[in-house]
Image: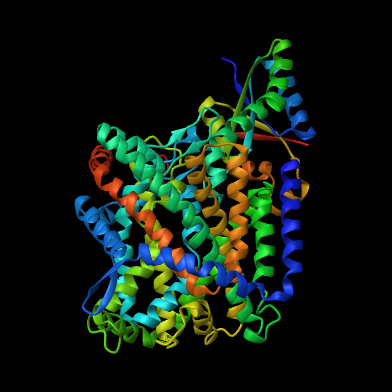
Amino acid sequence: MSKLRVGITTLVSLFASFSVLADTGIDEKINVAIKPFADAVAGLVFSSFPVGGVQIPFVLVWLIVAATIFTFYFKFINLRAFKHGFELVRGDYHDPEAAGEVTHFQALATALSGTVGLGNIAGVAVAVSLGGPGATFWMILAGFLGMSSKFTECTLGVKYRNELPDGTVSGGPMYYLTKGLAEKGTGFAKLGKVLAVMFAIFCVGGSFGGGNMFQANQSFSQLVNVTGGDASWLADKGWLFGLVVACLVGLVIVGGIKGIARVTSKIVPFMAVIYVTAGLAIIFMNYPMIPAAFGAIVDGAFTAEGISGGVIGVLFQGFKRAAFSNEAGVGSAAIAHSAVQTNRPVTEGFVALYEPFVDTIVVCTITALVIIITGTWDPSVDPGAGVQLTSSAFEKAFSWFPYVLTVAVILFAFSTMISWSYYGLKSWTFLFGENKFTDATYKLLFLFFVVIGSSMQLGSVIDFSDAMIFAMAFPNLLGCYFLLPVVKKELDEYWADYKSGKLVKTRLS
Amino acid sequence: MSSVLMVGVDGSECGDRAVEYAAARARKSDAKLYIAYVIEWSQFTFSTALENAERHKRREEEIQRAHSEIVDPIVDRLKSEGLDVEGLVRHGHVADTLNELAKSKGAVNIILGRQGTSKLKSHVFGSVGSRLVQSAECAVTVVP
């Protein structure tokens, strides 16, 4: 109870101090203060080199090349294990003795609640606007290749997790980079430690950026949009929205009020289903336009008429959106998936294949198709207005949808924030040790960034968010490259058992 | 050969009456009794990352608590009378799990209370008893 009291007192005092400053254009003040730092960091992470007139960030190439190499190294595991992954999620191989433990379905659902969010809704709108319909093709391709990255990192996440004496589980790139690389020798062990620390630092940054500020910012944007745009009472009260959300998030992560998180985790899949259903409805209501839409996608992917940067520009937008949306290669999913109950780590890798599939190939594509079919893609879109664009696309078919979308966006944002607060906390405690003080400092910082994110202009927020999340991919994938043979061994052993019928299928119908 | 009786308990008074009914039968016919408590759990729920990380620990705690608070007192009491009793705690869907347990232990009868701890839930979702009556693979006795 006292944890709750401390949390509430802190929040109330934060609220009080902010409301005192309410008249002084606090949104603008916060924005001006943070912007230079955010821009500097983003500039560093996205150091780019020109290809055909377009600046391609090195980190994007890093992600896509890794995804491609993994796909070939594991001989298209994203196709081969697709069916088996589904069987695992469905519980066909569920061990009755393990009833009550975390199942594959639960691990996948948890990870998805962290990744499905505003990238799928707002980000796709920006990508399709700036890159044209053709960006969708490259986005789907990147999603497909990314499945192999997720497979690799989630297998490693389960294999090298820490099972603590009190029964809790801790897994993720911090652990497979230290433990996994240590198995290869002392030189590697040192490298592993360095990479793990790098990863943890970037993950903390990511948990403040993409997992927090971006979510707060975009959900606020949609709320303003739906309550009247610039004329809305909320228009310059981002800090107020931030405080309310910070209170709710705080009740969950500081106060331990599980009820809110539990309710959210039940509603989020429901909202996702509504979103997907509405999208599919729009697509099928306009079924004569479907061939034309796909035509525009394929055309745009290879000819890129009128898109700045040509084909490379289109490719860049598509890849970038997929990478930010499904986080394949970033390593965050490995943290979520590591809690699954299994003694064959590669099974969770198979299950993780479905994350980029659902996130990018299904949800992002549906968003893209709706935008293309309704013709709302607008090359002059302001990257900050992504969610408004998607909103107007859906509004053309269902005039009430912007309200539903607002609720969905806020819930998705909330659940993503809860997930990333966990990933960030794990990284923070990896760096600074696990105790009440480190726990509390991280959580308070997290809540602080919720308020900051709601108040800032999106431009700087989105650059910083992207930067931190992509930066995680550098140590993560480097470690994954070295650990590929480990994953291959797990895969080959399991696949042999699977093919020879040694595995026990418990669900027979 | 003595028969096996599976008693489903849930901490409610109805469950206690089911135990008494089964115990009375066991005294007369020398049957083996299993006192089973099923912790409602589904493979397909949605949770947060923190809940998953703590799940193993919580599961152990839940099993422990079910044993110490509900199952073991019953088992100990009946054992002291000289009956052949064993306690079981499982996670899962209550009706299906009781059915599975009955099958695996070779029970000829599942005995449980008609009304569990939540009356509203029973009215909306149907009680465990009514589900079992429809789907069990052995006789089901519902004790009011």
**Nearer the observer, A346 or B93:** A346
**Nearer the observer, A269 or A204:** A204
Residue at 53 percent across and 80 percent down: it is A388
Residue at 28 percent across and 49 percent down: it is A478
* Residue A119 percent location from the top left of the image: 46, 68
Image height of A370 relative to B93, above or below: below
For the N terminus of chain A, give its image quadrant.
top right
* Residue A23 percent location from the top left of the image: 73, 75
The image quadrant of residue A300 is bottom left
Residue at 25 percent across and 32 percent down: it is A185
**Nearer the observer, A385 or A443:** A443
**Nearer the observer, A410 or A264:** A410
Q: Is residue A52 found left or right of A467 in the rendered image? A: left
* Residue A398 percent location from the top left of the image: 56, 83
The image quadrant of residue A467 is bottom left
Can residue A1 be seen from the camera position used here? no
Q: How many marks?
A: 0
* Residue A296 percent location from the top left of the image: 30, 85
Image height of A143 relative to A233, above or below: above
Image height of A397 relative to A474, above or below: below
Q: Is residue A302 found left or right of A235 in the rendered image? A: left
Residue at 56 percent across and 38 percent down: it is B54
Image height of A359 relative to B62, above or below: below
